[in-house]
Amino acid sequence: MDNPAIARLDAAITRVEAAIAARRAADAQLERRHATLKATMAQAVAALDAIIANTPDDKGER
């Protein structure tokens, strides 16, 4: 017994499940990119801190 309404519902469920899977993949990628950016920024701030710490002030002191 083929019911067109059930076939449409099955197709809709398949699309929703695909959208959920795609969203999870995008979220995971965004989390990885955020972690990489955070680490890069931490390195940049540490490098700037080192430069500032080794730069003499206007009195010639560090």
Image (cartoon, grey):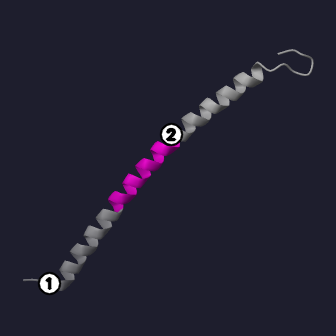
Which residue shows up at 55% across the image and 34% down it? 39
- On residue 15, the disc is none
Front-most of residues 11 and 50: 50
Quarter holding the N terminus is bottom left
For badge 2, the amino acid type reads: Ala
For badge 1, the amino acid type reads: Asn
**Magenta span:** 20-34
Which residue shows up at 32% across the image and 67% down it? 16
Crowd tier of the residue under label 1, counting other residues whose Cα lies within 10 Å: few below 14, some 14–19, many 20 or above: few
Q: Can you tell which quarter of the image residue 49 is in?
A: top right
Q: Distance between the residues labelled 1 and 2?
A: 48 Å
Q: Does the magenta stretch include residue 24?
A: yes
Quarter holding the C terminus is top right
Element at badge 2? helix
- Image coordinates for residue 46, horizontal then vertical, percent: 65, 27
Which residue shows up at 80% across the image and 21% down it? 55
13 left or right of 32 in image: left
- On residue 35, the disc is 2
Q: In this view, does 58 lie above or below 45?
A: above
Q: Is residue 57 above or below residue 32?
A: above
- On residue 3, the disc is 1
